[in-house]
Amino acid sequence: MNNTQRQRIEDCIEEFSQGKLTEEKLRQVLEDLSETGKKCQDLLYLQTSNTSLESSVHGMSIVEDGEIFAGPSDPNDWPYKTLLQAIRDGWRVIQFPNMALIMDESKTYGLGCEFILERLR
Amino acid sequence: MRIPDIEPTLTDTQVLEFCNQGYLMLEAVVPDEINSRVTEFIRENPYPSDDGGDFEDDKLLKEDWFVENVILNPHAAGAVRSLLGKNAALPTWMYNHQSQTPKPAQRWHRDGCSLFGSEVNHLQVFYYPQDTPVELGPTEVLPGSHFLFNLGKYMGHYGNISWSEYTAAPAGSIFVTVYSIWHRRSSCSAHGVRNMLKYLYWRMEPPQRDWIIEPDFDLDDLNDLENASYGDGAVRPAQEQLRNWHDVAEMFFWLSGKMEDFPAFLRTESWPMGHPPRKRPKDFHTFPGKR
């Protein structure tokens, strides 16, 4: 259940406790939750200095609720400083840095080690 | 048109720093009256596209006052003269990347025809005719990214990067970049016109160390670059340890027209060149049959 869904239920509880909850309101919430209940994949891209799960994150972007967000501009405000922190927050790694593509040790490819993580809500 | 016979303005140290960062900022070098005149000219000669349009036009390049004060600005042209040598060709086209309304950051990219490597055969130059604070979405650059191989089409998912820098600067600022540096328009939070003129200078002579020579400059002394490459907090965290040290030195040698001396500097023909660079034994990697 995501935050929006949880809030709709909390609103119903509040109205119920005040004696204001109606069948019409409940049916409306039921209909809305049926629509929003479709699971959407969140993605998290993290670029790190090395493949250790405790390596510092030096690049990020996130897809959450279908919206792309590059993250806060100040790295100090980024939600995760390491990959391990993201895993502990429920993110699942779906791709490790692909070493098969690193064909030449004299070149640096892209931003280094890139992990892709997902979360279904 | 070619750059006139002017003196170079960059020193050895500044050229090395350009190699390291991939760009050089020259703040407020164009006089205010010229900045105002450029802004007015753009207003009176609107381009065919509006906000956010990327369009090419050479009307300004046909204005003598613009060429004299911007294209041949002594600070900017002196830097170009230092890096591209004598007789460099002046810009043949110009883009105005105009922005007027709040908008998210552009995607990271390097411009088309970028070529990975140590050669600097043309320079990409940006000019702000108005004050361009962070709120107005200045160009964001990634220092050292000219040494990160990537294809533009594979950079679309990158978001914020910890060591990127904003080129927020006062009116009249010009910054000179290695063509292949990664960059993007940063997110813009304010209403207001941001004009950003972008153009290229072209090398027409072989590279040579024809800038201000510092008598005490010693390329062997790259301690700062070496020290910055250690640990998880390395200045260039995407690169292999010491790779930036190597790449910066290689570009400096190329610009100096001394690539034939680069293996002797490394004491090896290729990467890796031995670690630590400053403490290699004499004649390291010089035995017969060494690849």
Image: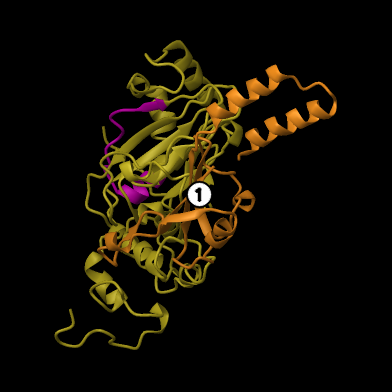
Counting labels gives: 1
Specify start and end residues of the magenta stretch as a single range: B79-96
Q: Quick one: label 1, few (<14), some, or many (20+) residues within 10 Å?
A: many
Foreground residue, A4 or B179? A4
Residue sitting farthest toward the left: B289
* Lateral position of residue B175 relative to residue B171, left or right: left
**Which residue is label 1 attached to?**
A60
Q: Which chain is yellow?
A: B
At which x and y percent is residue B178? 36, 47
Amino acid type at circle 1 is Met
Identity of the residue drawn at 31% across and 76% down = B273
Instruction: Tell me where residue B1 sits by quadrant.
Output: top left
Which residue: 45% across, 66% down?
A50
Q: Is residue B91 shown in magenta?
A: yes
Q: Is residue A28 visible?
A: yes
Residue at the top extreme, as displayed: B44
- Vertical order, B49 against B200 (above or below): above
User: Which chain can be seen in orange?
Assistant: A
Where's residue A92, x and y in %? Answer: 49, 55
Relative to B39, is B89 above or below?
A: below
